[in-house]
Amino acid sequence: MKNLLRPIFTLFFFLTIVTGVLYPILVTGISQVAFPFQANGSLIKNEETLVGSKLIGQDFTGPQYFWGRLSATSGTAYNAFDQATLTGSSGSNLGPLSQSLIDNVSGRVELFHSADPNNRSLIPVDLVTASASGLDPHISVDAANYQIHRVALARQLSEEEVTALVEQFTEKRQFGLFGDPRVNVLLLNLALDGIK
């Protein structure tokens, strides 16, 4: 019996050291040297104040801001920098016949209609549904364009000025092939705050 257990425990401890200690240290070291901004959460600061992460959706609710996608964990977008409302990541797992999903979408549609009653365009689906992780920092270009009128009105800017900013912060397809053009909500809102 001893002859059987010794190689098992030896292999267990060896793999624990390699995969549980050495590999994480190696990967962390490489990422800190090669990609320090991304490895540390792609955090964005305004002077010395931490304002968010380029990779995690933030909660913007004022009419002067572009609004992001819903978090599947609550009625608002994920906000990792507000400990009181920290929600974490979670998929909704709600099917198309789910009453909860129908209620969430209906409530979000009412919110957009009440925030901009004169906008009769169709609301893009990504503004009324949660992303798979609930952390998506981007919205579609259509979702950004839908909100231009409300944001311009609230900030007393022309729609052309706001449209130019949306175009400036539109990210192209990954490698020109993958995904769709998208707009990072946090970066766009920070640019708006820089204007007025």
Image (tube, helix red, strand yellow):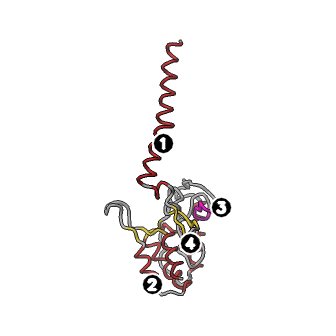
59, above or below 89, in the image: below
Query: Mark 4 belongs to which amino acid?
Result: Val
Residue 29 versus residue 74: which sits nearer the camera?
29
133, above or below 173, in the image: above
Which badge, 4 or 1, comes first in the chain's sequence? Answer: 1
Which badge, 3 or 2, comes first in the chain's sequence? Answer: 3
User: How far, Cα to Cα, is label 4 from label 1?
Assistant: 47 Å
Query: Mark 3 belongs to which amino acid?
Result: Thr
Reading the image, the residue beneath label 1 is 25
Q: Residues within 10 Å of mark 4 (few under 14, many from 20)?
A: some
Horizontally, residue 150 falls left or right of residue 30, namely right
User: How far, Cα to Cα, is label 3 from label 2?
Assistant: 33 Å
User: How far, Cα to Cα, is label 4 from label 3?
Assistant: 23 Å
- In the picture, the disc for residue 109 is 4
| Range drawn in magenta | 75-82
User: How far, Cα to Cα, is label 2 from label 1?
Assistant: 47 Å
Q: Residues within 10 Å of mark 2 (few under 14, many from 20)?
A: few
Reading the image, the residue beneath label 3 is 85
Residue 139 versus residue 161: which sits nearer the camera?
161
Please state, as top left, top right, bottom left or bottom right, where the C terminus lies in the image. bottom right
* Residue 4, position as x, y percentages in the image: 50, 15
Which badge, 2 or 1, comes first in the chain's sequence? Answer: 1
